[in-house]
């Protein structure tokens, strides 16, 4: 029989009558709901008009393009390549001019055509039972039409049907971007090309490439070779850079995917890597030799304002302009701490010559000078929203990262703006509270949070709204040490971003989740390490009477509320769960030694990775740093123990300004033992004056202690666990157990470190308080 899958594709059997009936039923479903809800198309098209019938896709289909139309030919080849890679479907490409009587005239055809009148990136797709026509007025439109058509056929299907319909589509915003930070951690050219490719699948068209910062200069500048021989390598030795030839190849590849690359050369701050190579450019009068920084945070080193420094920066930009044809060049401008400018006699003398008495006005002068140079070269300067000061050039573009307010202000004053707000579009934040999340900021930016972001500013007039070019999400890589982690943090949140930037504002979260499932299959076909957080399972364990472990499994609320057909299946015999496995319905009482495997399913399809838990006598009583409360809301991070990369261990949850945790409601009546595992982490953070506010020097022994407080963190220490056993050791160390004095009733236990200095930063992995 025929089986309808996502309302679009079917699996064939021979009985024609059943086939016809089920197809009619599927058409009724399509007529009732938007087609995009079932096709796996992300972002959702602007308009879909269902029709009658189906176009059958198999190896007999021919792709046709007009003679000598390179853009149509490129779009057809891209579609053919995608279907080959995800569906093992190899289709020939022919000229659309065929002599009458030829056999190919009768073959099912997908044709690419030019037409006038559509928007620069818009396209139409018409599907009838004999032919599919993709039409657009531009190369980008033809390309995006090919991408949508690819997504209408589920991954892995060599023969399938696409419902008859008409798609009329165009983007909501012209700027739909991602920022890749290659300074903090370096990605290979092959990875950058891969990222550009999957950006194109989502119709994302801007890659903002962050190439310079305090932690590394990543772009070859031939006039100044020390920028890469010195500035590309930090202490401890880590680094890399892109040669000019590699950049040209990446830029050409991006153009073939209709992605423009906007380079960022950070100035006047975030300059320590450049100053490590050329100290004379710095604002410290003595020009000390600086290392390339191995610390995170806001650094204080700035370029000076001498004519020779501007000549250096202009020479650098000249080479940048030769490599990147984009109309836009990002010049940074953020987090420029003015302490060195205020302290420098040379800078102050230059300020007097310029008639400038304010350090903030000095940055405006700096921005105007660099922006004017770019403008004279036919380019436009883009800067983070700190550049938005009186006197900002009319052609400068403001990238609004302090929330969305700067984009609003820029649009009112007549400057173009891009929405890139923190925290709403900062992808260095974890996606869920699950312990499977990799290192990063501890605050949560879920897939639904990104999907719910609304860029439209109703307070702006229609003319002002045109100054908001679009939106962009940021991949800051301080804690993304590997390319696979970049993928995890980017996808599928980039898919949600793409829909916000492309599709009409009337979006549906449940519909998006349904379309995401087939898109995840495409990620898997390409070996992409996407996050399954939205479908993940949150296990909770508690010790029960008789030694059993009460095991509770649940999905996250944003899934349960939107996908009532989602459910958890599990096994206890070591086999992988399947759609036929036991459905989880209520907490399980399991004995230590049990292995439980569980996964989330939507219908018959597994949508999460398998959770594998080996239960032990400690499972119900041990609490990890993820399961405890942080005592404060300072700078919360998920951090790896030294040497812990690739260990499979969950990162440690810690507030680096106050390493302290609360374990609620502990029974202390019988004087229980306390066991704890801790790790010494490098304190490699630039916090400025805030570092002096962190409590240190309260230790009793030379290495410090883990203090146990009861009913408040400021009470006298109830007990202490010396850290000597863990000092000078990598990884996680279990401290010797201690017995707590008996105290009737249940109490909140506060665990905080007393230490002699900031470095190392001590963090708790887990604690166990036995009854």
Image: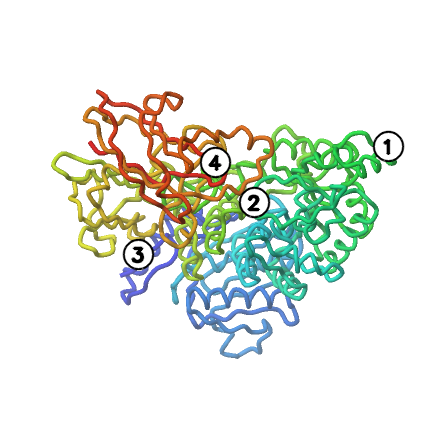
First in residue order: circle 1 vs circle 4: 1
Residue 86 visible, this orientation: yes
Disc 2: CA contacts within 10 A as few (<14), some (14-19) or many (>=20): some
Residue under numbered circle 2? 295
Judged by depth in the image, the label closer to the viewer, 1 or 4, is 4
Percent of width and height locating residue 525? 42, 61
First in residue order: circle 3 vs circle 4: 3
Percent of width and height locating residue 705? 38, 34
Q: Quadrant of the C terminus?
A: top left
Element at label 2: loop
First in residue order: circle 3 vs circle 2: 3
Mark 2–mark 4 Cα distance, whole angstroms, equals 13 Å
Mark 3–mark 2 Cα distance, whole angstroms, equals 65 Å
The dot on residue 656 is 4
Q: Is residue 57 above or below residue 390?
A: below
In this rendered view, identify the residue nearer to me: 705 or 359.
705
In this rendered view, identify the residue nearer to me: 355 or 148.
355
Judged by depth in the image, the label closer to the viewer, 3 or 4, is 4
């Amino acid at each position: 029989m025929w089986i309808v899958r996502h309302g679009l594709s079917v699996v064939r059997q021979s009985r024609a009558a059943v086939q016809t009936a089920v197809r009619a039923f599927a058409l009724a479903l399509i007529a009732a709901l938007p087609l995009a809800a079932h096709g796996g198309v992300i972002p959702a098209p602007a308009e879909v008009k269902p029709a009658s019938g189906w176009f059958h896709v198999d190896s007999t289909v021919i792709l046709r393009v007009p003679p000598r139309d390179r853009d149509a030919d490129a779009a057809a080849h891209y579609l053919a390549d995608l279907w080959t890679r995800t569906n093992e479907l190899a289709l020939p490409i022919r000229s659309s001019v065929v002599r009458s009587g030829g056999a190919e005239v009768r073959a099912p055809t997908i044709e690419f055509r030019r037409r006038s009148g559509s928007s620069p990136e818009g396209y139409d797709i018409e599907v009838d039972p004999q032919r599919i026509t993709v039409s657009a007025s531009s190369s980008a439109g033809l390309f995006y039409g090919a991408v949508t058509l690819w997504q209408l056929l589920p991954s892995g299907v060599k023969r399938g049907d696409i419902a008859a319909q008409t798609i009329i589509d165009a983007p909501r915003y012209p700027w739909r971007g991602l920022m890749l930070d290659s300074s903090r951690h370096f990605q290979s050219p092959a990875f950058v090309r891969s990222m550009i490719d999957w950006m194109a699948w989502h119709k994302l068209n801007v890659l903002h490439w962050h190439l310079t910062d305090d932690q590394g200069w990543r772009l070859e500048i031939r006039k100044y070779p020390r920028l890469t021989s010195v500035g590309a390598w930090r202490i401890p030795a880590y680094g890399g850079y892109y040669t000019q030839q590699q950049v040209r190849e990446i830029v050409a590849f991006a153009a073939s995917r209709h992605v423009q690359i906007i380079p960022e050369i950070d100035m006047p701050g975030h300059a320590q890597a450049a100053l490590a190579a050329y100290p004379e450019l710095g604002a410290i009068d003595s020009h000390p030799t600086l290392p390339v920084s191995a610390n995170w945070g806001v650094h204080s080193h700035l370029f000076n304002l001498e004519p020779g420094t501007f000549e250096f920066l202009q020479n650098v930009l000249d080479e940048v302009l030769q490599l990147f044809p984009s109309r836009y060049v990002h010049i940074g401008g953020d987090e420029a701490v003015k302490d060195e400018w205020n302290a420098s006699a040379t800078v102050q003398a230059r300020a007097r010559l310029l008639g400038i008495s304010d350090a903030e006005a000095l940055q405006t002068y700096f921005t105007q000078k660099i922006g004017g140079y770019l403008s004279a070269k036919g380019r436009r300067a883009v800067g983070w929203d700190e550049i938005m000061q009186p006197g900002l050039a009319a052609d400068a573009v403001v990238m609004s990262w302090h929330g969305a307010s700067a984009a609003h202000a820029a649009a009112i004053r007549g400057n173009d703006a891009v929405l890139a707000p923190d925290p709403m579009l900062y992808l260095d934040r974890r996606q869920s509270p699950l312990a499977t999340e990799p290192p990063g900021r501890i605050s949560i930016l879920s897939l639904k949070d990104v999907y719910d972001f609304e860029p439209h500013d109703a307070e702006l007039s229609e003319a002002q709204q045109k100054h908001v070019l679009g939106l962009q999400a940021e991949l800051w890589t301080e804690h993304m040490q590997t390319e696979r982690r970049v993928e995890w943090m980017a996808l599928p949140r980039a898919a949600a971003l793409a829909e916000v930037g492309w599709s009409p504002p009337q979006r549906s979260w449940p519909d998006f989740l349904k379309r995401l499932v087939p898109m995840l299959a495409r990620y898997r076909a390409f070996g992409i390490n996407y996050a399954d957080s939205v479908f993940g399972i949150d296990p909770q364990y508690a010790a029960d009477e008789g030694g059993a472990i009460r095991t509770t499994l649940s999905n996250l609320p944003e899934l349960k509320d939107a996908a009532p057909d989602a459910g958890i299946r599990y096994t206890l015999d070591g086999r992988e769960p399947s759609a036929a496995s036991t459905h989880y319905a209520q907490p399980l009482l399991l004995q230590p030694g049990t292995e439980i495997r569980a996964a989330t399913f939507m219908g018959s399809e597994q949508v999460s990775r398998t959770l594998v838990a080996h239960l032990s006598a400690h499972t119900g009583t041990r609490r990890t740093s993820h399961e405890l409360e942080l005592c404060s809301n300072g700078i919360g991070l998920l951090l790896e123990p030294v040497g812990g990369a690739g260990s499979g261990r969950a990162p440690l949850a810690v507030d680096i300004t106050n390493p302290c945790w609360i374990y609620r409601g502990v029974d202390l009546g019988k004087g229980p033992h306390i066991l704890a595992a801790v790790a010494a982490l490098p304190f490699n953070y630039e916090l400025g004056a805030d570092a002096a506010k962190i409590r240190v020097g309260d230790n009793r022994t030379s290495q410090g202690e883990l203090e146990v407080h009861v009913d408040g963190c400021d009470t006298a220490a109830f007990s202490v666990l010396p850290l000597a056993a863990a000092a000078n050791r990598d990884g996680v160390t279990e401290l010797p157990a201690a017995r707590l004095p008996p105290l009737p009733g249940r109490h909140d236990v506060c665990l905080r470190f007393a230490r002699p200095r900031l470095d190392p930063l001590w963090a708790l992995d887990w604690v166990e308080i036995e009854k």
